Image (cartoon, helix red, strand yellow):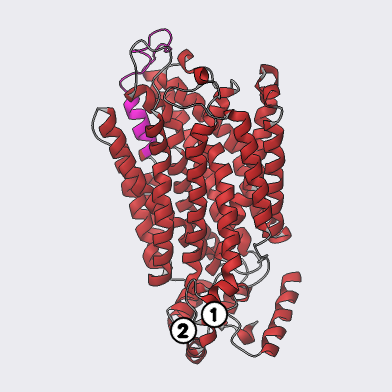
Amino acid sequence: MAGDQLNVLNALDVAKTQWYHFTAIIIAGMGFFTDAYDLFCISLVTKLLGRIYYHVDGAEKPGTLPPNVAAAVNGVAFCGTLAGQLFFGWLGDKLGRKKVYGMTLMVMVLCSIASGLSFGRDPKTVMTTLCFFRFWLGFGIGGDYPLSATIMSEYANKKTRGAFIAAVFAMQGFGILTGGVFAIIVAAIFEAKFPAPAYKVDALASTIPQADYVWRIILMAGAVPAAMTYYSRSKMPETARYTALVAKDAKLAASNMSKVLQVEIEAEHQRVEEISRDTRNSFGLFSKEFMKRHGLHLLGTTSTWFLLDIAFYSQNLFQKDIFSAIGWIPPAQTMNAIQEVFKIARAQTLIALCSTVPGYWFTVAFIDVIGRFAIQMMGFFFMTVFMFALAIPYDHWTHKENRIGFVVMYSLTFFFANFGPNATTFVVPAEIFPARFRSTCHGISAASGKLGAMVGAFGFLYLAQSPDKTKTEHGYPPGIGVKNSLIVLGVVNLLGMVFTLLVPESKGKSLEEMSGENENNDEGTSSSNNNQNSAVSTA
């Protein structure tokens, strides 16, 4: 491989796992820890927001967010994330990964704090300012997707690259888990200090005035891990692949990686100039040559991430509603406001502990053993099976004696989402596109996923409503019910299996081999190097 590749890139590809790999995982991973915390903590407090700001005197049930407000509060961060993925993905290829990396964190820190400081006392003002700051919070989170994935892929060796990128993404599991645990602690403290009767006993007294602090504290805590990581990110050197292949600075690439790898690396100015003069790899994004080489790959990464996130986010954001439907969370009127936060957080924490976190780390363990394609196909297959197994005998699962079985099946669906396409759709786009488009194409793929998340998040609010008008939640039109919604999600997962066929396997191959950036020499050299790489991947 070295004959066809810059020494600095070859040194990274064949480097043994070292401390700097783990440092990069932690630095990039803490961003994803914060991302997951910030995106999913809102689902812990939406019921509380309804009780505080939309209480109706004399109503049989506690106040809930109106449909349009609930959709905005749950979905506005996704709109920001989508915009941030496209913008920062493009900017990461224009200015460099390092320059843009710190910007995303600062946006996340400032907007996490601002979300909790949403001002005013009337519902309209609070919800408007909350949505405004959560949009910009999402914008910062969006930038973390393409930048973290690209930086980790460009730092990693080819033997364990999949595991390293997946480990960064797996920090999401700990973010979701921490969000649930932190909400439990906050709710327990407030319940102990300010006990209150259940809603059916005293509707007004069931929501204590101090409850307004609970949701604010939970949202603002997301700023802490992001702020802790900022200094470390600012000290990371620019990746060698960006410096050498995009910025064309051979000396700086060799110098930076010599320090990181603690070996002497030759600068190769002449080789970099040869690469920059070669017109075969100078095509633009969405040009005819790009579409010929990478069009189907981009369709594969965007469509699979889109389909996965429809299923994943419709479940994750609204799992509290599913748990309520099967009786795992008691009826709202039997609890006070703080108790409801506690029960919802407990349910989310148990799911994260039993299925979400283990699923991510199974991917880390096996992605470089059985490959990305196999894990993604297997994940979509089992998600389809478990969705239909939940949906078809849905009435059976609603009986009290069968609730544990429902939770087990639901947990397995999550397990195979994370030991499956939820991780691989993040990994693959960072490996298969040229360096000068890598961050942009990952951002496009991720944005497609967030579009799917918006479809899932908004759609499920309406779809899961009972077809019977008398049984729908206040303000919602009749839907198709939870059973039929689960069938729809099963079909979505089935389509995910079909589009996975467009995604190439990148296990054991260098980034330049996957992107075609090594195709600078004659056919003989290229063929000989492919043979060499095959030997490496089977070693």
- Residue 401 locus on image (x, y percent): 70, 18
Circles 1 and 2 in contact, beta carbons < 8 Å: yes
Residue under the point 68% across and 32% down: 390
The quadrant of the image that shows the N terminus is bottom right
Residue under the point 32% across and 27% down: 212
The residue sitting at the top extreme is 201
User: Which of the two residues, 155 or 372, is positioned nearer the viewer here?
Assistant: 372
Residue under the point 42% across and 7% down: 201
- Residue 103 locus on image (x, y percent): 35, 59
Q: CA distance from mark 1 to mark 2?
A: 9 Å
- Residue 66 locus on image (x, y percent): 38, 28
**Amino acid at the residue labelled 2:** Ala
Give left or right: position of 94 versus 33: left
The residue sitting at the left extreme is 120
Picture layout, residue 205 above or below residue 259 = above
Q: What secondary structure is marked by label 2?
A: helix
Q: What secondary structure is marked by label 1?
A: helix
Residue 84 picture quarter: bottom left
**Residue assigned mark 2:** 250
Q: Is residue 340 magenta?
A: no
**Amino acid at the residue labelled 1:** Val
Residue under the point 67% across and 18% down: 399
**Residue assigned mark 1:** 8
User: Which of the two residues, 137 or 395, is positioned nearer the viewer here?
Assistant: 395
User: What secondary structure prevails in the magenta region?
Assistant: loop
The magenta region covers 194-219
User: Which of the two residues, 539 or 308, is positioned nearer the viewer here?
Assistant: 308
Label 1, residues with CA under 10 Å away: few <14, some 14-19, many ≥20: many
